[in-house]
Image (tube, grey):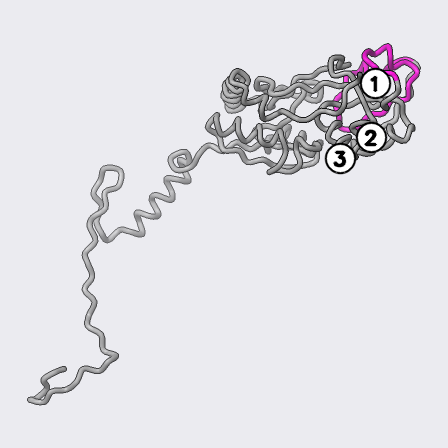
Amino acid sequence: MYNIGGRFVLKPWYVRPRQMHKKPANLKILGHLLPESQPVRIKTMLFSLLLLFPSWGLADTVTLGSFYIPSLVESAQQGTFVEVARKVSAKAGYPAEIIFYPAQRTRDAFASGQLDGFFPALSQSLTQPHYASSSFALKRIYAFTRAGDDVITSLQDLRGKRIGYTLGFTYSESLLKVPEAEYQSTILEPQSVKKLLAGRIDVLLGDETSTLGAIRAQGAVHQIHYDPASPLDEHPIYFAFRNTPRGKKLAADFSVVIDAMKANGDLQQLLSLPAAVPAD
């Protein structure tokens, strides 16, 4: 209510009293007292500093490429090897960004410098110089045969056989040049398993992870056997990093973590997979 010329007038409901603003305290940035009139300049300065020095506010992310392998790398988020990659990189202090490509595109992206590294890497499939971490798994190649057929435990046993293999796998030259053997390839492992079950091949060359995964998926664990104690070939699996100072440091840091996880059993636990029925 207002007193105007001796008359009392009600204050309109829509008239609001002037807001009383608190005076903001001066901001102390990097040890210097900055005037209150510079909030926009402060924000701009901090943003520019983060752009120039990203390590001040962001973790050092490592970009890793990978490709589809049944049960091991199902996508950028799923798979046994994906879990290993995320665990190892996190323990090493590098949050991982995993890029999921076809196999050849992954290797091309690595060679062109688009990726810090990739996995799973095998020395037989890489020709350019690179830094390798400690191995986190072994790729063992076995001869899978139908239950009831002879178990194959050596290269000599492959002579004269119809041998199936999957494109994209890494095999030693000796496995693909057995005298008197006939070779048949497929693009996907489930196709190779179907050919073995149908009797179109005598032997399937594969491993204890993706091959067994395809066998389990088809419910054929009791129809196919192999000798777990007699691999025909063996290759260390590791993380490959670029041939740069950063790549060298990444390989060293990843190796420290991998070696520690081997020693305490964490790595074996991550990699544990059920096997198919071995030979009697």
How many residues crowd mark 2 within 10 Å: few (<14), some (14–19), many (20+)? many
Q: Residue at position x 66%, y 18% from top?
A: 138
Q: Which residue is mark 2?
A: 193
Q: Nearer the viewer, mark 3 or mark 1?
A: 3
* Residue 205: quadrant of the picture: top right
Q: Tell me the kind of residue under disc 2.
A: Val
* Marks 2, 3: nearer the viewer: 3
Relative to 37, is 7 above or below?
A: below
Viewer-closest of 31 and 63? 63
**Amino acid beneath label 1:** Leu
- Circle 2 sits in a helix, a strand or a loop, which is it? helix
Q: CA distance from mark 3 to mark 1?
A: 26 Å
Q: How many marks?
A: 3
Mark 2 vs mark 1: which is more N-terminal? 1
Residue 217's label in the rendered image is 3
Q: Circle 1 is placed at which residue position?
A: 176
What's the amino acid at mark 3?
A: Ala
Q: CA–CA distance between discs 2 and 1?
A: 18 Å
Determine whether, in the image, residue 208 is placed left or right of residue 267.
Answer: right
Quarter holding residue 128: top right
Can residue 245 be spotted in the picture?
A: no
The quadrant of the rendering that contains the N terminus is bottom left
Q: Image quadrant of residue 211?
A: top right
Could you tell me if the residues under marks 3 and 1 are in contact, i.e. CB atoms within 8 Å?
Answer: no
Residue 113 appears at what percent x and percent y?
A: 59, 30
| Along the viewing direction, whichever of 200 and 38 lies nearer the viewer | 200
